[in-house]
Amino acid sequence: MAILVTGGAGYIGSHTAAALLERGEEVVVLDNLQTGHRQAADGCTHFYEGDIRDEALLDRIFGSHEIDAVIHFAANSLVQESMTDPGKYYHNNVYGTLCLLERMRANGVKRIVFSSTAAVYGEPERVPIEETDKTEPANAYGETKLAMERMIRWFDAAHGIQNVSLRYFNAAGAHESGRIGEDHAPETHLVPIVLQAALGKRPHVAIFGDDYPTADGTCIRDYIHVSDLADAHLLAVDRLRRGEGSAVYNLGSGRGYSVREIIEQARRETGRDIPVVVQPRRAGDPAVLVASPERAKRELGWNPRRSDIGTIIRTAWAWHTAHPEGYGDR
Ligand code: UFG
């Protein structure tokens, strides 16, 4: 049996495909390479360059491989862009997921692990956030991810498509091999930006606001190692193969770090000076986002063992120093 990984050439998708291959699974990747990198999917059993909205291609893939589960990453994921171009997000994310689910249904594929986000919660009422907390997205990106989660649940109710939605907090770090890592253009995420500044590829790190109600005034986030995220997808596939039914899990470490703490840790790990400039708050940033990962630990047996901030920064730094231009394909 094979697993179809949509978006398997992206950051989290490629780390999950690598983890699947490491345990001997047959992996079929579908990626339109809009934001993914062909090299990131090297070693995958089969690679298709194409779009999840191409229903004929989906039929061809489902017809050519014995696919027993889909792990669905393919989506646009920039919060700011989703606010200026929501149509792009509804088309690729929501309509794309509809195409995928329709072709899964038509081809009798009954299991899907879905790449969701903490952005479905919006401004939290309390931290740590639990899966049962209110979902009220504060941006179009989070809104489309919540719509996708809900669509998948209706396909379960009507067609028995069993699903696990994984709500990631802040993915960071890189594969232990140093072969794959984070390469976005433009880069908007804190950890790669800090390390690009450490490499001298940026003059400084802009801190977006230091007047938040936190100990040092900067925002607190829950950083989770991308390979720990990858492990959770494998455990979610196992859960579905055991027939234990649909579920939703937060994936975070349960511990928060401020923007200043991340920069301090990066200074320690890299031994480099990292200049900072304090700028105004970025619109839509909640002060504190921290997960309760207890349900995933309890029900999936998930153990995020690489998510201490030292390991996250060290593995990311190894990737950035070995690949200062990322995959070098843009
Ligand atoms: N930040 C800076 N300077 C930068 C970049 C980020 O100060 O140059 C700050 C942000 O304001 C925020 C923190 O660093 O407080 C983390 O920012 P990221 O952009 O790395 O991540 P976000 O928490 O904004 O967003 C991430 C994912 C989203 C997802 C969200 C859910 O990128 O896709 O988590 O919590 F929706």
Image (cartoon, rainbow, N blue to C red):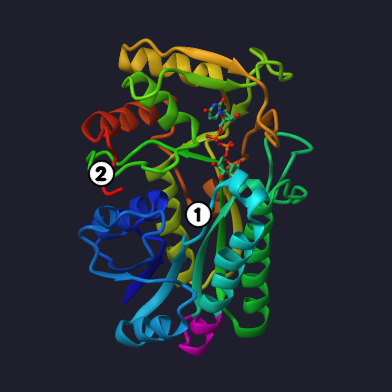
Residue 300 - label = 1
Disc 1 marks a residue whose amino acid type is Leu
Instruction: Note whether 60 is above or below 228 in the view shown.
Output: below
Let me know if residue 310 appears in the view.
no
Is 158 on the left-hand or right-hand side of 36? right
- Mark 1 against mark 2, which lies toward the viewer? 2
Res 6 seen here: yes
Around disc 2, counting alpha carbons within 10 Å, would you say few (fewer than 14), some (14 to 19), or many (20 or more)? Answer: few
| Mark 2: secondary structure | loop
Q: Is residue 4 above or below residue 280?
A: below
Give the side of residue 209 with respect to residue 264, left or right.
right
Q: Could you tell me the amino acid type at mark 2?
A: Gly
Q: Which of marks 1 and 2 is nearer the N terminus?
A: 1
Q: Circle 2 is placed at which residue position?
A: 328
Q: Which residue: 47% across, 62% down?
A: 74
- Magenta region: which residues? 102-109
